Amino acid sequence: MVVRMRHTRAHTANRRSHHALTEKALNKCECGAMRVSHRACPNCGRYNGRVAVDLVARKQARIQKRAGAKKGAVGNKSEVK
C-alpha cells in the first residue's frame, strides 16, 4: 500500500527543526553553588536573597521520620486491618 500524501524529507526535517534540546540556564548562588534560574538553591535553600526553603529543618524532619519508621517496623503487621 502506498502512502497517498507522503511527507518529503524536507518537510519532515523542517518539522523536527524545533525538537532540539536546550541547556538549562545555570546561575551562581550566593553560597557559590550552581543552581537553575528562578529556582531555590538545592544547597542553601536561598532564592532572591532570602531563605525560601529551610533545608536544616527539612533534614531533621526526614531523620525523625526515618527513626519513627524503624521503631514501628519491628514486625507487628497483624495490627493493620
Image (cartoon, rainbow, N blue to C red):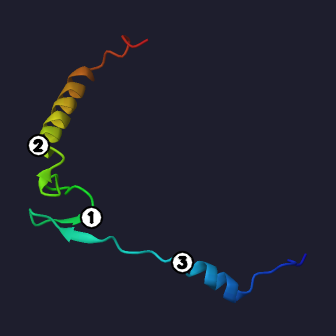
Kindly indicate the quadrant of the structure image that contains residue 22: bottom left
Give the labeled residue for mark 3: 18
Give the labeled residue for mark 2: 56
The image position of residue 34, as x and y in percent, is: 19, 67
Quick one: SS at disc 1? strand
Query: Alpha carbon of mark 1 to alpha carbon of mark 2: how far?
Result: 21 Å
User: Which amino acid type corresponds to the residue marked 1 in the rendered image?
Assistant: Val
Q: Residues within 10 Å of mark 2 (few under 14, many from 20)?
A: few
User: At x 15% / y 45%, what residue is drawn?
Assistant: 55
Query: Alpha carbon of mark 3 to alpha carbon of mark 1: how far?
Result: 23 Å
* Left or right of residue 49, residue 4 in this image: right
Quick one: SS at disc 3? loop
N-term mark: 1 or 2: 1
- Indicate which disc residue 25 carries: none
N-term mark: 3 or 1: 3
Kindly indicate the quadrant of the structure image that contains residue 3: bottom right
Which label lies toward us, 1 or 2? 1
- Indicate which disc residue 36 carries: 1
Q: Residues within 10 Å of mark 1 (few under 14, many from 20)?
A: some
